[in-house]
Image: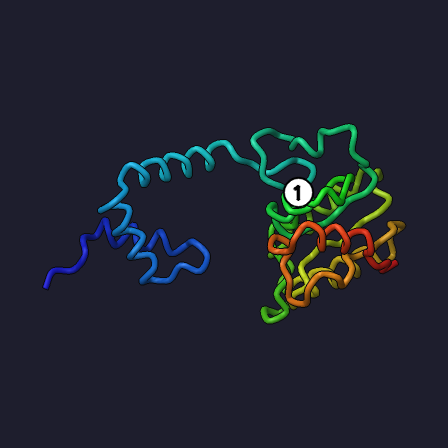
Amino acid sequence: MMGSPRILDALTKALRVLPAVGPKSAQRIAYHLLQNDRKGAAQLAQAINHALEHVQHCRYCNTFCETEVCEICSDQGRRHNVLMIVQMPIDVESMEDARCHDGVYFVLMGQVNPAQNMDLSAIALDKLVKRLENGQIEEIIIATNFTAEGDATAYVLSELFKNQHYKISRLARGMPLGGEIEYVDAGTLAQSVHDRRKLK
């Protein structure tokens, strides 16, 4: 019996980089795109290539943007002395949708996993330290998820800032245990920012 063409195998393997997509799901997606939606597949490929060419990290907050500095960091109407640290760019979107933070952000682009020996290379600590060098920041809000990884990340950050002059707080436990910011409704998110607890 003939196996799948090598090009199709390569496409299936490439699709497995997507989160929660295993071998069978990747194969189904590949077959669907080639059999039922070649135009959509071409648009997807074009959009991915365009994003890879034009999306970069903001020089200050490390989120995704199309310019050297993102809109939030370049907005002079925001409080540039209050920094909220989040894990991923989608967390910035969630906070902005909830309209509960008028300061600026820093995006870690990951989290510390306690099951993997607390590997700090998963988060952009060097960029964060560089971000803080200008001395403008007075308050830091740690807005990591209430998961084992989010708690570990918050611990690492609180230790990093322990002997610094910053006012430090973390989102209130109104956030559900095990909750991830991108899935929390705007009202709960806003309340957790308002009721954040002081760490230092």
Q: Which residue matches tag 1?
A: 97
**Image quarter of the C terminus:** bottom right
> Can residue 127 be spotted in the picture?
no
Q: Is residue 46 above or below residue 185?
A: above
**Residue 15, x across and y down, in percent:** 36, 52
- How many numbered callouts? 1
Of the pair 45 and 10, the residue shown nearer to us: 45
**Residue 155, x across and y down, in percent:** 75, 63
**Image quarter of the N terminus:** bottom left
Of the pair 155 and 31, the residue shown nearer to us: 31
Q: Is residue 51 above or below residue 150?
A: above
Q: Residue at x 60, y 71 (%)?
A: 115
Give amino acid for label 1.
Asp
Q: Residue at x 89, y 50 (%)?
A: 165
Q: Residue at x 81, y 42 (%)?
A: 82
Q: Residue at x 74, y 50 (%)?
A: 190
